[in-house]
Amino acid sequence: MKFNFVSEPEQIFPGSCEMHDNTDCSEEDCDGELIEVDEMILAEFFDTGKADDYISGYFLNFDEEKKIVSIVGEMSEDENAEHTGEYIDAYMVLSRIELFSKEWKISWESEELIDEDGTVITD
């Protein structure tokens, strides 16, 4: 499976809060707790202990300077099953990445997932 998800720049803001659904906030307009977004905060989305989340977030990276999220890499069928004890298909992976995108309001500059047969799962 080949992952090629790269967000548009400045997708994740440093002053995000759960109260305003992880959008840009400031101390003046937010009485929620501001969080400094880093790769660990983003990775928590996939830290559920479930196999589909493990595979979906395996290549997650966050460039803190440019505020670019990426999920880029390649994993064979054997590696997929080896990591989790079961094979996770591309449609399950795509479903989790789409939920991640929705939660963090990420617009992807590049959005491509290719299964082991070479079938492009995304447009």
Image (spheres, helix red, strand yellow):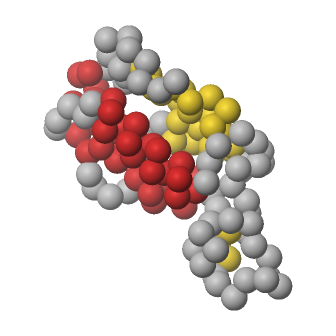
Residue for point 48% across, 51% down: 100
In the rendered image of this protein, does residue 84 appear above or below residue 67?
above
The quadrant the N terminus occupies is top left
In the image as oriented, which residue stretches furthest toward the top?
A: 118
Quarter holding residue 104: bottom right
Instruction: Using residue 122 as the reference point, say whether residue 78 is left or right of it.
Output: left
Percent position of residue 50, x then y: 26, 51
- Residue occupying image coordinates x 64% and y 84%: 32
Residue 110 image offset from top left, x and y in percent = 62, 29
Q: Is residue 116 toward the left or the right of residue 46 in the image?
A: left
Q: Decide if residue 42 is in sight here.
A: no
Check the image and name the residue furthest to the front: 123
Q: Is 42 or 122 nearer to us in this picture?
A: 122
View extreme (bottom): residue: 31
Q: Say if 117 sits above or below 7 in the image.
A: above
Task: From the top left corner, tell me how far across and down residue 96 is, in percent.
Answer: 39, 46
x and y, in percent, of residue 123 in the image: 52, 24
Count of marks, rendered view? 0
- Residue lying farthest right? 28
Q: Tell me which residue sits at (23%, 22%) in the image.
A: 78
In the rendered view, tell whether residue 22 sits above or below residue 57: below
Which one is nearer the viewer's eye here, 34 or 123?
Answer: 123
Q: Specify whether residue 16 is in view.
A: yes
Residue at coordinates 57% horizontally, 42% vertically from top-left? Answer: 61
